[in-house]
Amino acid sequence: MAEAFTAEQVFDGTQMRRGTAVLVDGSAVAGMIPTAEASARGLALTDLGPGILAAGMVDLQVNGGGGVLLGAGVDVVMLARICDSHARLGATLILPTLITDRPDVTQQVIDAGIAAARAGMPGFGGLHLEGPHLDPRRHGAHDPALIRPMTEADLSLLARAAADLPALMVTLAPEAATPAQIAQLAAAGVIVSLGHTGCSAAAAHAAHAAGATSVTHLFNAMNPLANRAPGLVGAALTSGLRVGIIADGVHVADECLRVALAMKAPEGLFLVSDAMAVAGTDADEFMLGARRVLRRNGRLTLEDGTLAGADISLPQSAAFLAGLGVAPERALAMTSRIPADVIGERAHGRLTPGARADMVHLAPDLSLRGVWRGGVRIA
């Protein structure tokens, strides 16, 4: 039997509605109806009260969670743990993300991802491979010894992986992959994102023309915008590239966030958590390969102070933007429908007929109050 869910406001992925109930039939959204009609029809109605009922969030950059970091030794069970941890934090669809690693580890992660996809793992939206084809001068927390240019063997591996995964995003630097290689990746269905680069704006525009469609964590691990050297930042802000950004008060100054929000059309900017293994846990440190990462005061850093991922969830990121004066509709779209659109996912990130009934209930301050996956409450 169909159920109905309502709250003070309902955000369908595009607009905010009042006096509206989300009709859920099984694990899917069947539509929206006036709340009064749901009561008149005798439907089981869950009224969540104050706050906002919205689609489950979509995170395209998740390095780990629940104590698990994506990397060597990963299997389907570990992927499920990462997905489950983030679902309980509000992101009901994620791209587990592997940062620069050895070729054998990349293959192992791809194999685990394909197995997860074939098993229909809830919350698994595909993979994000951040590296190893980066600019070693802008390595950030990546191991520079493992960064290398793209080869034909890499192209072949990524093309095969894209065919077997729901989505495959690859972050690369124009210095490490030619426009021809980018075009081949795009033709194979890979979502090419530019990042960890000191490239010129011209090189970024050339990569975009070749098929790159996105930018990874704007402002971080790339040359800053300069008056005669706009670089990737300038290209990202003045082109049709869709741009991921971390809103945690640590990675990007408030003024830079405001610039990005003002420069990019609403559809062009989305939030990522860049979460690490400690997400969803109270652990105060973890290992990134052979390096120790410390969790202190909302920051994750290597022992030398280099930022190593972020310590924030997507609901917290949306709340951070709201604190800067961003309308809740825009902040929530940046955590749901827009990132879903970036990877071509139409069954998530929105509450429209046929979409999966993944939902979050947020307090008026956008803090998380509840999570439903496939119509079933999990948090």
Image: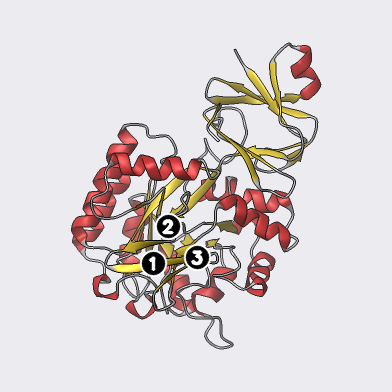
Would you name the residue on which mark 1 appears?
A: 293
Query: Helix, strand, or loop for circle 3?
Result: loop
Q: Is residue 360 left or right of residue 342?
A: right
Identified by mark 3, the residue type is His
Q: Position of residue 54 (x, y in %)?
A: 65, 39
Disc 3/disc 1 C-alpha distance (Å): 19 Å
Q: Is residue 360 above or below residue 334?
A: above
Would you name the residue on which mark 2 appears?
A: 276
Name the N-terminal-most of marks 2 and 1: 2
Would you name the residue on which mark 3 appears?
A: 217
Name the N-terminal-most of marks 3 and 1: 3
Task: Give the label, 3 or 2, closer to the camera.
Answer: 2
The one of 223 and 94 positioned closer to us in this rendering: 94
The one of 300 and 346 positioned closer to us in this rendering: 300
> What is the total number of numbered labels drawn onto the structure image?
3
Name the N-terminal-most of marks 3 and 2: 3
Identified by mark 2, the residue type is Met
The one of 318 and 65 positioned closer to us in this rendering: 65
In the picture, the quarter occupied by the N terminus is top right
